Image (cartoon, coloured by chain):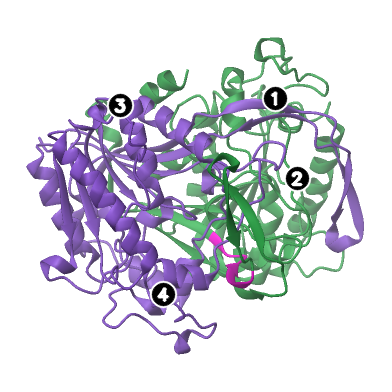
Chain colours: A green, B purple
Amino acid sequence: MRNEIYQAQTSKPGENPDNVMRIRAVGSFHVGGRSVTLGGLPERDMPIGGGDSSLRVDPNGDFEVEQMYAQYILLEEPKARYPMLMVHGGGLCGTTWETKPDGRPGWQQFFLQAGYDVYVSDAVERGRASWARYPEVFQSEPFFRTKKEAWETFRIGPLGGYRTRPSMRIAEPGTLFPIEAFDQLAKQSMPRWPTNDAAIQAAYDAYLRAVGPCVVVVHSQGGNFMLNAALHVPGTIKAMVVIEPTGTPYHATADLSALKNVPILFVWGDYVESNPFWKNTRDRVEQFRQRMLELGGIADVLNLPAGGISGNSHMLMMDRNSDDIARMVQRWLAAREVMK
Amino acid sequence: MRNEIYQAQTSKPGENPDNVMRIRAVGSFHVGGRSVTLGGLPERDMPIGGGDSSLRVDPNGDFEVEQMYAQYILLEEPKARYPMLMVHGGGLCGTTWETKPDGRPGWQQFFLQAGYDVYVSDAVERGRASWARYPEVFQSEPFFRTKKEAWETFRIGPLGGYRTRPSMRIAEPGTLFPIEAFDQLAKQSMPRWPTNDAAIQAAYDAYLRAVGPCVVVVHSQGGNFMLNAALHVPGTIKAMVVIEPTGTPYHATADLSALKNVPILFVWGDYVESNPFWKNTRDRVEQFRQRMLELGGIADVLNLPAGGISGNSHMLMMDRNSDDIARMVQRWLAAREVMK
């Protein structure tokens, strides 16, 4: 299957001459974080060579920790006024926006072809951002998302619908997620810590300061981080597409006035009503959206099933109609005057 | 400093029109690995919200583990016959080949501009490949490279030359590593496990099978993995540049005949003689190279100080003269008839 996926995504040159991207730079950087010194830890003998011998390791010393990672691809002649920052959700990293699990090009390529400089990041603790010792630096143990949890939480199938054997799994009726590629999505899964929110937020704030004026497309757990970053670094985010956020700046006393000038589009997929977690989450986010409207902000919503588009999972940037959704997102962004 | 680095790497459009890259696709995939089921582990209460409350986590279930990650950028009209696979060393990931720690474009961009489709990968356990529970899946604990170990092992400074305060660190005399950016390099550091070699190798073998005919540029710990992959997937690697490998297929009984038709260039930097680990390593690799020559293979060596180029560290793709070295590498590759 891997070879087929690989062949599908690497079509021959010249097949889509209109979609050629003229690139002036590709690169990456780490931003945020701090230096720590660990001391007083015992040396350890680590097994090597299949356990035949061991390696003496002194874990004490200096480390860089709590940085995040961002990779950029910059166009020779961007059509957009601002670069696009693509921000992933919980237990995942920037691969969310790259090639879809079934091998079709991802939103990273879509928005490059739409004319944006595109930045794809990995939050603190995940992917190329790396992670740090616990409990000495990160305060708790990490936990790993099971495939069952992903199947249910991503609303690919109903609660109780997961089975180990792929052919036995029960999907949502009419799902547009390519369920044959679900295990490929599971390979993108990242361990996560429940105690790193402050460090993740600090790095996102530093990231916004480093990049400057931008538009943001953010998913799930990332939504709350980027809404808070918009409050912490006011004036930087020129428009924001928030896909199924799991939270928002929620304190009733929070001063949200800096968000008033950030046009926001919330996007929701299908099967929300039958999932208590997501029903409750969407209700809370809708309350937040009403507060934004009361402040005089632009806070739109693209509720796909309400608009007659059924079948979308939480991972809607990977669903079969995901490029149609990307086009809707781009139309909304263009109406916010972010294009030249 | 971050902002300065960021500004340096994102120069304005139109500054280098000759270097524009015409790209037909950008994407990524995970390859290799397996599905595992964990059972019998106790549920845990994970602290959340700064410890105010907790989350009940059941760690049992199905997981995808031991896959690796590769990202590709494909040119509209590659000048090379084969894509280039860039493979990192130990305790690091694909960022080795991206923007240098001091903000200059990395070898990824260099070889794209030279006309190769470029693949940059993260090995099992690192970066976007993700990692798995231990001791249930990975058999040991990970360990973390200290900045002191990096300073010494990467031959940026002599043994004993590291200090916590950057201005007090002792560098090798005449070093070409941009020492002011050393802490930025330290942010690229990845935890590593001493017990994952078989899984890492299996995924590299699967990666080669998925991509097919290619050239390889590989660094340090990756060298031994890719030399073994060349033996396991014969006929696939058309030429190979092995930068300061820490090992080679060493069993005296190993059948190395499949390597006979793979032209190999070994590259070595400076300060090797004064570092016992590296002196010993280079001697062993040189013995391997002699075996390759005896088999009738092409096994060249680019020993930079022997050729009058002094000052290179183990991270020579990040040194101030790294693009000069890339040009030497490209001249050697071109002589192997890998260009159209």
Q: Which residue is mark 1?
A: A156
Residue furthest out toward the front? B252
**Label 1 and label 3 in one chain:** no
Q: CA distance from mark 1 to mark 2?
A: 21 Å
User: CA separation, marks 4 and 2?
Assistant: 33 Å
Which chain does the residue under circle 1 lie in?
Answer: A
What amino acid is labelled 1 in the image?
Ile
Q: Chain of mark 4?
A: B
Residue A339 appears in view: no
Majority secondary structure of magenta residues: strand
Q: Nearer the viewer, mark 4 or mark 1?
A: 4
Q: Amino acid at mark 2?
A: Phe
Label 4 belongs to which residue?
A: B181
Residue under label 3 = B212
User: Image height check: is A182 above or below A128?
Assistant: above
Provide the secondary structure element on which disc 4 rests.
Answer: helix
The furthest residue to the bottom: B168
